[in-house]
Amino acid sequence: MTTLTNKGRKQNIIDYIGNKYDETKIIKDIIDWNKYDVIIEPFCGSFGFSRYIVWNNMADLNKKKFIFMDINKDLINFYNEIKKMKINEIKEIIDKYNEFVDFVYEKFKCNHQNNYIYLDRKKVDKYISGMKDTFFKKIIIYNYSTSGFCRIVRKKNIFDSINMIRHKNVMFVCDSYLNIDKHLPKNGKVLMYLDPPYYNSSVNKTAYDVDVSDLYEIFKKINEDLNDKRKYDSILVHKGDILMELLWDKHKKFEFNKTYQITKKKVKHIVFGNFLKK
């Protein structure tokens, strides 16, 4: 497979608010990564967990398999399109994306921090509605955050993420966690990284519009799987919740404070898991 080379700090092709890339720094030393043959992210988003462990040499892409799942069909199709595209096509699209970012910076005279711009989603929709390049539009759309803003950053060093997406040991599947059992490999030790959507009581839905009844079933299955050590090792990172702490107290590993990027609020998060600590 032809690969692309980065210079400087690695970037991902999609930026999700609250992705787990930085959070994985906190848990990296408590897991024996060498014992696992397969890493699965059933709520993959921008697969920040797996990117971190690969980019920091904790997991070898050539020796492990990665299965990334999400119920968002367009997102999974987006990744699978990248798998099929030629390198020169990807380069051309990224150049066009960067031209758009330069235009937005100039158009809105943005005061940006850490090279990010946060825009109202409706403003961005207006500017991309006439674009003919579907793939280009998808890159922008999937930089949308769950908060209703568009998070835009100029892409300079994204080729490590593209190479990872295109790797033969990486697979993208559009399906619900409720159907995870049919996607489990027949052989090999599995580590499941669980990052389910958060419920927003003010609007009676989750961040990604997952039906609340489905969310109940998701957490019911997580509970069953955490208590069934025969299936696979699981790790779950979630914001502090009294019910979860009571329900999964025996699986609690530790807690930490996470600072949200937009609000700058510190919120307690808890790491649960049925794996044995190093």
Image (tube, rainbow, N blue to C red):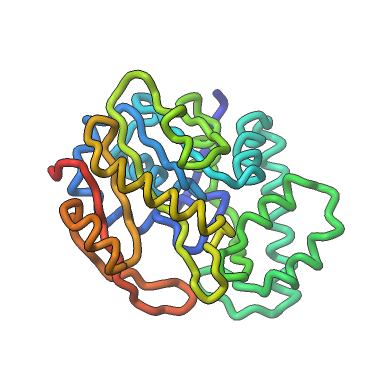
Residue at image position (18%, 48%) is 30
Q: Quadrant of residue 59?
A: top left
Residue at 69% in and 69% down = 121
Label count reads 0
Of 156 and 274, nearer the camera is: 274
Q: Position of residue 210 (x, y in %)?
A: 55, 55
Q: Residue at x 28, y 33 (%)?
A: 232
Provide residue 224's location: percent of width, then percent of height. 31, 43
Query: Which residue: 31% across, 48% down?
Result: 223
Q: Is residue 183 left or right of residue 94?
A: left
> Residue 108 sits in which quadrant?
bottom right
Query: Image check: 87 left or right of 238?
Result: right
Above or below, comparing residue 276 to residue 246 in the picture: above
**Residue 131 coordinates in the image, percent (x, y):** 83, 54
- Figure quadrant of the C terminus: top left
User: What percent of the width, then of the height, locates residue 64?
Assistant: 35, 27
Q: Pick the quarter of the image with the N terminus.
A: top right
Image position of 138 (left or right of 60):
right
Q: Please identify the residue farthest to the top as the structure is shown.
A: 187
